[in-house]
Structures are given as C-alpha cells and as structure tokens.
Amino acid sequence: MARYNVNNYAVEALLASIKSKEIAIPEMQRPFVWDASKVRDLLDSLYKGFPVGYIIVWQNPKVKLKYGTTAAGKKVLIDGQQRITALTAAIVGQEVLDDHYKWKTIKIAFNPIDETFEVANSANQRSSKWISDISEVFKTTFDSFNFVNQFCQKNEITDQASKINDIINRLKAIQNNSLGVITLADDLDIDSVTDIFIRINSKGVVLSQADFVMSKISSNTEYGGNITRKTIDYFCHLLESPADLKDIQTNDKEFASLPDFSAIRWAAEKVSPIYKTSYTDILRVAFTYKFKRGKLSDLVSMLSGRDFETREFKIEIEEDSFRKLHEAVLQTVNKTNYERFLMIVESAGIVRGSLIRSQNVLNFAYALYLALHERKVDSSIIEKIVRRWLVLSILTGRYSGSPESTFDYDIKRFFSSDDPMAYLKLTEAGDLSDAYWKVNLVQRLDTSVTSSPYFNMFLIAQVKAHDKGFLSEQISVESMLENRGDIHHLFPKNYLTKNDLPKGQYNQVANYVYLQQEINIKISDAAPREYMATVIEQCKTGKPIYGGITDLDKLKENLQQNCIPEGFEFMDINNYTEFLAKRRELMAEKIREYYEAL
C-alpha cells in the first residue's frame, strides 16, 4: 500500500476544499509569522509558474461510530498553513493575526507594465502604474475590460491595451495554478509521518510530535479541540508577552467570553516565572498526568479514537480523549496549581530558571504534582515527593536521553501501587547509592562548564541553606543569584595563568565561588595564602579589608558554607590540584546533605 499520494489542486479549488472542511486546517486565528515580502515572493512564483512546494495533509483513519457504522476521517493539514494563510490574505483580502495577536492586512501591489509584484507602500499606492491591491482583481465584481481601458488612459498607453489585458488575465489565472498536495496514508504511525515529512520538506524542517498534536487538536471543532488549542496558545503567549492581553480580548471576542479565557488571563500578571511553558510543555504535562502515559504519539492515536486493545478506531474514544485533554489542559494552566507547583520548586532552593537546564525535569515534576493532587494525596507528601523527584532527576540526568519513554515508564510506576512514595524510595536506592555520592557525583564535578547541572545543584544547596557569599558577612548566595552576581575564582585566574595552567584547569567549577565583585577586585591575582592572611588579620584587628567578616568563628563558618577545604589559607600553586579534589568532595557532600533534608 502506498504510504502517500500526490495530487495537484488549483489554488482556487484548494481554498474551496479548506472552506468546505474537506481538508481540516488548524484554525486560521494563529499568528502569521511570514513577513509581507515572502507573500509577495509566493505570488510572484505562482504568476511565473514556478513550483511553490507542497501542502502536506494526513488522512485520519476511518472511525467506528456508536451504532456500528463507520465514517471517513478528515484530512488534517500538517504543513503549509503559512502558505495557505498568505494566499487567503493576498488573493481573498482576508486579515491575518500577527505574532502579537493583532489583526492586519497584507496588500500586494502589481505593476502590469513590467509585471512585478511589490508589498504595498505609499509610493505604489499613489502611482497610476500599479494595482494597489491585487485582491481587487480576484473579486467577482472585477471588470477586466473597464479596468484595462482606464489603466491605459491614465498611463497614456495607446498601442498595448491587448498586452495589458493578457497580463491581467495571467494575474487572475494565479488562482487556477496548481499546488501539490501530499496526502499521507491513514495507517501510518506518527514516527513514519515524521520521517516522511522530513524527507519531503526541502528545508529540512523537523516537525515535532507536539506539532502533530496541535494540528489535530485545532482542526477539531466537534469536541472543542479548537478551544483547547487556543487555551494552550494564548496561555503560553501571555507568559511571554503579557501586554498582548488586551489585543487578544479585542481580536477574539468569542474566546474572550469563555471560561477558558478567564482561566488563563492571570498569566499576564506573572512576572518572569521560573517555569515558562511552551505549547509542547503544556501538552506533555497535561497528557502525562491525565492519561498516565508519556508518548505524545499515543495522544495522537487516542485523539483519532484508537482502541489500543482491538486496534480499532472508535468515535467514543475520540470524544472521551478530547474531553479528558481539555480538562487536563485547564488543570495545567490553573493559577492555583501553577503557583503551588512553583512554590514547591522555589522551596527546593531553585530561585532562577537558569539553574535548571532541562525543561522536561520541570514538566515531569509538574505532571507528577497534578497527578498526585488529583489522587488526593496529602499536600505535605506531595511536596516531599515532587521536591525530591525534581532534584533526583537533575542529579541523574533522568530526562536528558529519551524523555518520552522515561516519562511513560515513571508515571506508570508511580501509580502502579497505592503508595507513590514507594517508587521514589526504590529509585533513590538504585540511583543515589553511597557510590553515587562519593564517586559519581565527585567525578561529575570535575568540569569547567559553569552551566553544569551539578555545579548548579551546589548553588541550589547553598540557597536552600541560606549561605553567604565567599567572605561576605551579609550578602547571601541567593541574593547574588537573583541580582546576577558574579562568579569568581578562589585561585585567581591571573595567578594561575602566570603559573602556566591551561584554561580547562583554572576554570574548573571547583575553583568557582560566588564572591562580591569589590572583594574580587581587591584580591586581584594574589595566591590564597596571601589574601587569606589578610582576612585572618582583619579578624584579629576588627578592620575589614576583604569583605565585612571580622570574627574568626564567622570566617570559619563562611568557609564551611562555601565548601572551602581546611588549610586553604596556606595554599599556593603547589596545592591547586589537591585543593580541587578536596573541594569536589566537600561540594558533593553538601549536595547530599541538601537532598536528604528535602
């Protein structure tokens, strides 16, 4: 059986098929990201008969109805929405939404004398040589004969009326030019569809599984899929661009009147949350927590009505899946849920989004929170499980390889027994043994990458412990992180380079510490034994030079908070390798103490 077939549609027929819903296009109220020059180029290519790429649609499988009959599935557009929108804007004159959800028109002008297209501007709008908006030509009321006569009179053309008439007819014939439509077979799984898409797409664009899901959701109006998609889209957009709230209200009054909009408008008030979600994140969280699955390909199948046992496609499964997904999305974007989850994240010492490199760590933790909450687990137990699982996932790189498979495995294991805490303890026993803390983690701290999740975890542990910055009496590590404080070298960089150490050695994370800039400037390129001698002296005299610490007991506490090895005050270049090894062990031990106290 062919995996796909290719047919040519006239532009006019293609737009008619979309209008009749033979092809279900994701709702047109989506931001149009092409600039006007790309619309112009598309029209120019059609006019000249050049190929303009393919529209790709996926034939939905036949669905078994409740009374035993079957219905053919719709075709869902999965690639080509921008081209379709461009054609409706230029030829039909339909307004489009820009990426700030503001309506705008895109007018393309045409010069019949030299047969050129341009984006409409003040110059060609005033010129008699230009058709200021080609959409006028495609209206049924357009009179070619009168237009050609008037155009020739205005431009004093006496002997080329026939040529101008032919050119206008060629322009109108754009709607008869063909676009290729590739229809993918209904029995293809999502991985095969993805592979075919990548091979066909000349730009090598990768279409994610979340893109397939969003196309499928938004093209469904029977079960409110289009509303679900808007809820996701607008929520994520408001987190990024809160100022667009009024434009969304103005330009989409129908959605703005729904409870779904009331449920998300709070996102416009949230200032720089640690957890900023894209539509992929919302889908992944909602699906994982509600359906207890991790593979978005399964969601595509369920939204098509697939019965995983009989392998049939049933209308009741399709309807139920859309209902459950809508409920799950509303719970995911719910203000109370979102903010309580953020409180748990912050209570673990994670005060900046940059401290977590993996968005999927947050995604699973949020899905876990929602699933436990829905199961009515005690809130104190939820907090403990989510906090520890979040940190465990970071420490072990749990979702860095194949996140979907691991999501699927973990969510099923968490809810395979009556006690979700049991799976956490089982995983801790296997992944966070003594060997991990004393060997594996110490080795992973042997890196010069400052964005290392293990160095970030050390900083998180310092935040949780309310530690002060190195040699700081009052300024905390948390304050430095929140105010973008500076990381500096304990063994100064210039000191190490003068002693011929390579960059990979002097930039080791075990040589880094959060330190006030003014202290760092005073230290300059002195060896630890030099500047620490001054620090010890200031504790005796009470006259601060490096920071405000003037008490030996407070100095000792500060060094312990920053995992500075004993004897650091006597060290120089000869002790650098020994220093790094000892500090890594101390950093690993601090992280362990932090984790076990969560």
Image (cartoon, rainbow, N blue to C red):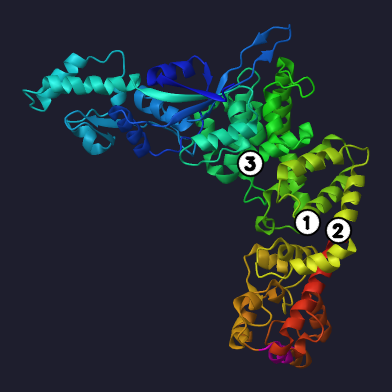
Q: Are marks 1 and 2 in contact (CB under 8 Å)?
A: yes
Q: Name the residue under label 2.
A: 432
SS at mark 2 in the image: loop
Which three-letter amino acid code belongs to the residue tagged 2? Answer: Leu
Is residue 543 in sight in this rendering?
no
Please, what secondary structure does the residue beneath circle 1 have?
A: helix
> Which residue matches tag 1?
396
Alpha carbon of mark 3 to alpha carbon of mark 2: how far? 37 Å
Residue span colored magenta: 527-535
Left or right side of 288 for 82: left
Tell me which corner region of the image, top left, top right, bottom left or bottom right, holds residue 480: bottom right
Sequence-wise, the earlier of marks 3 and 2 is 3
Most foreground residue, 372 or 181: 181
Looking at the image, residue 291 lies above or below residue 275: above
Kind of residue indicated by mark 3: Ala
Q: Mark 2: few, some, or many residues within 10 Å (few <14, many ≥20)? A: some
Q: Looking at this rendering, what residue extends furthest in the front direction? A: 1
380 drawn magenta: no
Question: How far apart in space, not on screen, are marks 1 and 2 (Cα)?
Answer: 8 Å
The extreme left residue here reads 158
Q: Mark 3 points at which residue?
A: 267
Depth-wise, is mark 3 or mark 2 nearer the camera? 2
Q: Do the residues labelled 3 and 2 touch (CB within 8 Å)?
A: no
Label 3: few (<14), some or many (≥20) within 10 Å?
many
Looking at the rendered structure, the kind of residue marked 1 is: Thr
Q: How far apart are marks 3 and 1 (CA)?
A: 32 Å
Q: Is residue 7 left or right of residue 435?
A: left
- How busy is the neighbourhood of tag 1: few (under 14 within 10 Å), some, or many (20 plus)? some
Instruction: Please say if 205 is above or below 181.
Output: below
Query: Is 530 covered by the magenta stretch?
Result: yes
The location of residue 13, given as percent across then percent down, is 41, 16
